[in-house]
Amino acid sequence: MSDVMESVDVAVPVRAAYDQWTQFEEFPRFMDDVDRVEQVDETRLRWAATIDGVHEEWDAAITEQQPDERIAWRAVGKGMAGIVTFQPLGEQSTRVSVRMSWEPDGPVEKVGAALGIDASHVRQDLARFKDLIEHQRVASGGWRGEVVAGERIGDARPPASTDTSLRDDQDRIPERPDAPEPPPTW
């Protein structure tokens, strides 16, 4: 079994980092070997990747998802699983940590795991995620539902604001008593 654990600190609120990570179909924007991810439903993903010139496809099941905290998954029919956690470091900073475990398949994957190449790939993917979310400043979308034991529970309401970098209590800009009345909208 091979394990990788890597983290990156991003200069955005936890909600923005988490919401961007829930946009699975955008993973190819920062995951180098990933060709595409299709979200089949709220708990199933279809992956396609080209790793060291070898094209692979597999399904993954989201086993746990807690907004602003964690997303855990496992590959269906493969010895692969992972978890991504989101730890607020302040109002405008978040630590994103990835832990993956898998059974290397064949001699090339076994050598890559032994040499730490897999950890390097994850570290580089996290650096690209950092560049993406810090450049955007807000997530391109977000899913706020919960998954427990592979089943969706709770309410998957969209955030109150389209600016997912804001916390719930910041969604509305307070009115200034001395501000002029806005013009009517007809």
Image (cartoon, rainbow, N blue to C red):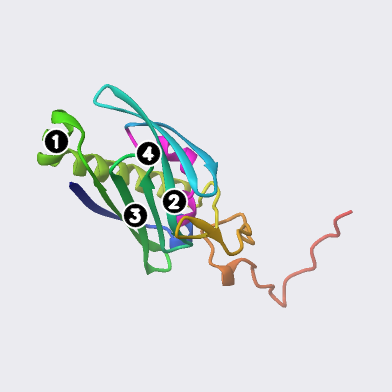
The residue labelled by disc 1 is 110
- Tell me the amino acid under the disc marked 2: Ile
Q: Secondary structure at mark 1?
A: helix
Question: Farthest residue toward the right?
Answer: 186
Q: Marks 4 and 1, how far apart in space?
A: 24 Å
Residue at point 32%, 51% (across, down): 82
- Of tags 3 and 4, the one toward the viewer is 3
Residue 62 - label: 2
Q: Give neighbour class at mark 4: few <14, some 14-19, many 20+ (Cα, 10 Å).
A: some
Span highlighted in magenta in the image: 18-32
Residue 30 - label: 4
Residue at point 72%, 71% (across, down): 179
Q: Give neighbour class at mark 3: few <14, some 14-19, many 20+ (Cα, 10 Å).
A: some
Residue 33 percent across, percent down from the top left = 32, 31
The residue labelled by disc 3 is 83
Q: Looking at the rendering, which quadrant does residue 116 occupy?
A: top left
Q: Secondary structure at mark 4?
A: loop
- Tell me the amino acid under the disc marked 1: Lys
